[in-house]
């Protein structure tokens, strides 16, 4: 199976399966001389890990990361960095009933037809469990980008199913289990009640996640086929369950007029940011703004019509521990993919053009 490596100069290759002994990744291309330890990586993994609230899978994984290589005397050496996360709470017997059939909306059917074999335990390689090493790798990228350019990342849930979550302040993201940037206690209670009802009903729901990168250097990205926004969209679509990506105004651009959408320039900076921080595939120095649409979880308890390997009709019911909304834990994953794109483009720009410029003022914020 190919397609397990992301990035060109800062490349990340993941390995493992949901119910195997361990998952992890190898980072190739991290610049040498940066202080790095497990303590730099673990907080990001803790944001993503399962079992953090009653609204997500109750699989209990510490997601403790081990650095196996690429760091000597506390600093990166420029050689491949191997990260290992051991699986601790597999319950493979929960998947015995789907070993010969296909869950609707899942990768079971396509994996079987493509490879002729699949690991049904927790989705195997197609499981969202494999986003953990990506978040770990991105913690390394985030630290380098912060040190070099002051680049920071933030994300939040802006919609849960049909419930809009208005943005109030980034400080609220850490105060609730949804990564909602809202201090509205009634809204959070409504979201929690909705999730409780879904879990009891054996159903699932989707979500919209917004992510932003600030203090981004000007000049990242290359026309025509290595555009920064094109690579961002590619990265976001690589996240499990993502079915849509918007950059800047996104689909709202359809209803805008040119006089509204085009971000005017002043000596102090841009007046707006409908472009989402990218023009002509190259970063403007403004905030990079991205939104992703995440579909409802495919693995649900409600019986669904499907077929088995022989093509005979069956009813499929999934008994494993699953998130009724995979979007709840998707915020740090979306941040991670954005960070991996930006560090890759920063290194490519440095190789071709030298040091990048610092961000221009963004008076639209």
Image (cartoon, rainbow, N blue to C red):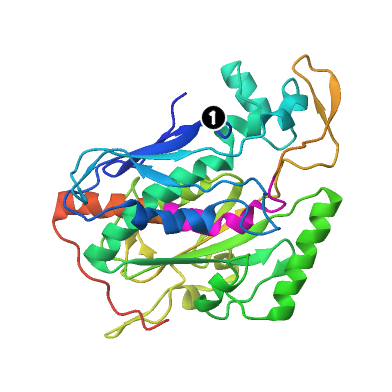
**Range shown magenta:** 322-337
**Where's residue 365, x and y in %?**
42, 81
Q: Is residue 238 visible?
A: no
* Residue occupied by mark 1: 20
Q: Residue furthest left?
A: 354
Asked whether 169 or 229 is in front, the reply is 169
Residue 47 in the figure: left or right of residue 39 = right
Asked whether 357 or 343 is in front, the reply is 343
> Looking at the picture, does residue 256 appear above or below residue 132?
below
Q: Main secondary structure of the magenta part?
A: helix
**Where's residue 132, x and y in %?**
49, 46
Q: Is residue 123 visible?
A: yes
Which quarter of the picture shows residue 319?
A: top right
Residue 16 sits inside the magenta stretch: no
Residue 330 sits inside the magenta stretch: yes
Identity of the residue drawn at 62% across and 61% down: 208
For mark 1, give the secondary structure.
loop
């Amino acid at each position: 199976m190919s397609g397990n490596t992301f990035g060109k100069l800062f490349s990340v290759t993941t390995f493992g399966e949901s119910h195997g002994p361990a998952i992890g990744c190898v980072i190739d291309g991290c610049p040498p001389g940066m202080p790095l330890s497990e303590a730099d990586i673990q907080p990001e993994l803790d944001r993503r890990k399962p079992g953090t609230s009653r609204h997500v899978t109750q699989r209990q994984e510490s997601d403790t990361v081990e650095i196996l290589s690429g760091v000597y005397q506390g600093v990166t050496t420029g050689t491949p960095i191997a990260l290992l996360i051991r699986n601790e709470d597999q319950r493979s017997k929960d998947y015995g009933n789907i070993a010969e059939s296909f869950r609707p909306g899942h990768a079971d059917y396509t994996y079987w037809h493509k490879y002729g074999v699949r690991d049904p335990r927790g989705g195997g390689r197609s499981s969202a469990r494999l986003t953990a090493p990506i978040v770990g790798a991105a913690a390394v990228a985030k630290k380098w980008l912060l040190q070099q350019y002051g680049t920071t990342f933030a994300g939040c849930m802006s919609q849960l199913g049909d419930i809009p979550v208005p943005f109030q302040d980034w400080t609220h993201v850490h105060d609730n289990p949804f990564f909602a940037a809202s201090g509205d206690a009634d809204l959070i209670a409504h979201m929690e009640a909705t999730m409780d009802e879904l879990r009891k009903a054996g159903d699932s729901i989707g979500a919209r996640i917004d992510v932003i990168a600030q203090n981004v250097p000007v000049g990242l990205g290359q026309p025509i086929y290595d555009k920064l926004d094109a690579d961002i969209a590619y990265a976001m679509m690589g996240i499990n369950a993502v079915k849509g990506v918007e950059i800047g105004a996104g689909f709202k651009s359809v209803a805008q007029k040119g006089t509204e959408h085009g971000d005017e320039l002043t000596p102090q900076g841009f007046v707006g940011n409908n472009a989402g921080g990218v023009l002509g595939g190259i970063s403007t120095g403004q905030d990079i703004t991205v939104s992703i649409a995440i579909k409802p979880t495919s693995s649900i308890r409600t019986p669904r019509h499907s077929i088995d390997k022989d093509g005979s009709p069956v009813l499929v019911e999934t008994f494993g521990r699953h998130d009724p909304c995979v979007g709840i834990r998707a915020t740090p994953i979306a941040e991670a993919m954005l960070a991996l794109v930006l560090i890759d483009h920063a290194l490519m720009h440095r190789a071709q053009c030298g040091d990048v410029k610092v961000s221009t003022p963004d008076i639209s914020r």
